Image: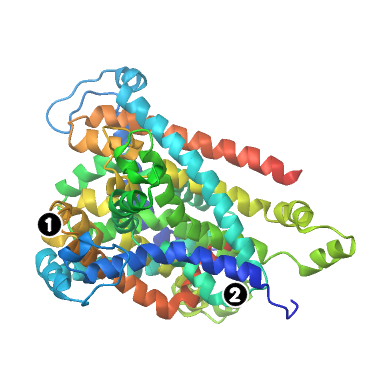
Amino acid sequence: MVKKNYTYLIMVIPAFVIFFTFHTYPALQGIFYSFTDYKGYGNWDFVGFKNYFNVFQDDRALSAYGFTFQFAITATILVNIVSLLIALGLNANIKFRKTLRATYFLPFILSVLIVGYIFKFIFTHLLPDMGKALGIEILSSNILGNPDLAWIGVVILAVWQSAAFNTLLYLAGLSTIENELYEAADIDGAGSWKKFWKITFPLIAPFFTINMVVAMKNFLMAFDQIVALTGGGPGQATESISLLIYRGGFEGGEFAYQSANAVVYFIVIVVISLIQLRVLERREVK
Amino acid sequence: MTGKKNWKVTALLILGSLFIFFPLYLTITIAFKTPQEMSGNLLALPESWSISNFITAIEMTNFFRALGNSVFVTVITVVLVLLTHSLVAYAIARNMHKKFYKFLYFYFISAMFIPFPIIMLPIVQQTSMWGMDNLIGLAFLNVVMQLAFNVFVYVGFLKSIPMQLEEAAIIDGATTWQVFWKIIFPIMKPMHATVAILTALFAWNDFMLPLVILSDSSQYTLPLVQYAFQGQFSTDYNLAFSSYLMAMLPMIIIYIFAQKWIIGGVMRGSLK
């Protein structure tokens, strides 16, 4: 094809223009306003890096980062353990495999927000009632009302919902492993524990990497779960970064300040994703 | 695999699946109970399976209007995504050796790492200024937000399709458009399924984008309606749960009939 083909250009240019207008341009605007004192309306002035300094001195922002990390790291680890176990089980020679697989994938298709409301009822009414009836101290109070424990409720909801997708990814990984490898290991007399660490885990390492990175990224962006379960409370104990940006930006007149917060947040997500990829991929090579 | 079934693992998995079913069991039973029954055993089955909660919830939340809004946004989003994203991905995949298309590819997929909050505040101002704070605007933004991931998946798939078929068609005098619509678009069917499933699930269940974009409560989608009625729901769990159940039911029904297809589609996407 020597002749220049303009058809391809016609195919991509509209998408390019639209994507720039509705994605890149607002992102640039956000970065631009982060250097101003814009409230979302009216006049504004440049203030340099003032908003950025303030983010690092703002107790509410720091506590949002603290909670989001604590939640995201715990949930990422738990989700990966749980979904790897489920995937190993589903990959074994079991009865009702299709039905069980469909069951464990079900949470993926449900609205996080609505499931969150259902879990809220479980935490605030069902568990305390059961705890009281059975005389179990830990269960008898509403954990969502306790600033030190509320985040655990968010973790439980997140694991329940996200394990579905991660399980599927691990299943996809497990299906790529040849059965002969296990048969050879059997001949060598390897136990199941050894087979898992020597064969299974190294071979699904790429899926482990993807799962860790995707889960972590999604949990760092947590919003629906928290709106449904705790609304960020009690106090601001479970206010995630997304929720803080939403509240401050729309309800608090902090357009510029929360834009700066969003830029910091963006950098944090990119850096964490890159570090994870680096570290985990190096493990894979070994 | 050997014929001997592993019953121990089967039993463990069945036990574990109770955790999945439990919240749903609770939702269904509470949705059919009366407020008086809530003071008794919460785990018990309803005494009389009354549908009055559903009737009240339908009227109160204007359920069918919200359902219509959700269907509208989901259908428009999926149709636009399938038609446009596959086209863009095709142009990119067949020109990856050129600098501009390579740049476009990485430009689009890099958006996967940009958290929505960074564009949230400006885009809300932009959409309301341009009169896009409605369902059409929402569907349009859905298409923009999904571009990154879908281009990634489609391009990955197109790389695996041999060029001979297209080259033969071009020799026969077909234009690039004809090649795309007559040959490539039909070939991409398995990927269309994956993209359609993931996009539909996103558009149907999304909460954040509708929350910030839609200004008129008559256009609220199903998740947003549950959020908007929390004030009224907090005193009447039976009403709330019947509303939640109805909001989740369309997806659950589709899932029951198409679960094999849905799981297969998502799995195909994840292998790319």
Which circle marks residue B217 in the picture? 1
Instruction: From this view, report whether residue A275 is shown above or below residue A177.
Output: above
Task: Identify the residue at image location x=45%, y=48%.
Answer: B112
- The quadrant of the rendering that contains the C terminus of chain B is bottom right
| Real-space Cα separation, disc 2 to disc 1, in angstroms | 52 Å
Q: In which quarter of the image is residue A200?
A: bottom right
Question: What amino acid type is highlighted by mark number 1?
Answer: Ser
Q: Where is residue B134 in the image (x, y as percent from the top left)?
A: 17, 57
- The quadrant of the rendering that contains the N terminus of chain B is bottom right
Question: What amino acid type is highlighted by mark number 2?
Answer: Glu
Circle nearer the viewer, 2 or 1 = 1
Q: In this view, does A34 lie to the left or right of B271?
A: left
Q: Mark 2 points at which residue?
A: B167
Viewer can see residue B85: no
Callout 1: residue from which chain?
B
Callout 2: residue from which chain?
B
